[in-house]
Image (spheres, rainbow, N blue to C red):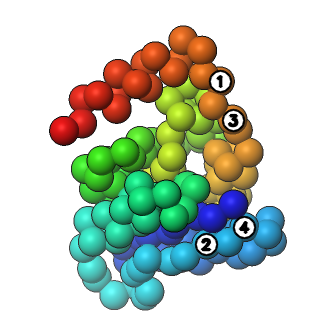
Amino acid sequence: MKIALGSDHGGYALKCDIIQLLEKLGHEYKDFGCYSTESCDYPDFGEAAARAVASGEYDYGIVICTTGIGISIAANKVKGIRCAHCADSLEAEMTRRHNDANMLAIGAGFTGKNLAERMVEVFLSTDFEGGRHARRVNKLNAIQP
């Protein structure tokens, strides 16, 4: 599985933890930035990771900022992206099952390493259920220009 990553300075340390997890699990990944804790702008990196997923080059994306909110908004501006800001592993599971989310956003200021790792594992291992949920995802996709 190929994963696109992005963070701002507030999510940088947690992204480094997630990179270690992805390596342990044997997933390919690309880090679209940022690359330090120096102050930067989350839209740049949320958009870059989202475009990589939307292009089909990457299967899923994981984006991280202090709250997870801003970077999820940036990712969701890209056509074809369904980025869910999740705060626990049940949300990560359900957004895959019901929303076919292709990106996960995490708030590093509220989510510790262990929970974030569990969320990533669940997100990447959960399949979309389809059925009635496919109709709803199709409606979500139709909203985009």
12 displayed left or right of 39: right
Mark 4 / mark 1, whichever is N-terminal: 4
**Above or below, 92 relative to 138:** below
User: According to the image, label 3 marks what residue?
Assistant: 127
At label 1, the amino acid type is Glu
Q: Position of residue 25 (x, y in %)?
A: 80, 65
Query: At numbered mark 4, what does the secondary structure look like: helix, strand or loop?
Result: loop
At label 4, the amino acid type is His
Query: At numbered mark 3, what does the secondary structure look like: helix, strand or loop?
Result: loop
Q: Quadrant of residue 42?
A: bottom left
Distance between the alpha carbons at the discs numbered 3 and 4? 17 Å
Query: At numbered mark 1, what does the secondary structure look like: helix, strand or loop?
Result: loop
Q: Are marks 2 and 4 in contact (CB under 8 Å)?
A: yes
Q: Residue furthest top?
A: 132
User: According to the image, label 2 marks what residue?
Assistant: 29
User: According to the image, label 1 marks what residue?
Assistant: 129
Q: Indicate which disc residue 27 carries.
A: 4
Mark 1 / mark 2, whichever is N-terminal: 2
At label 2, the amino acid type is Tyr
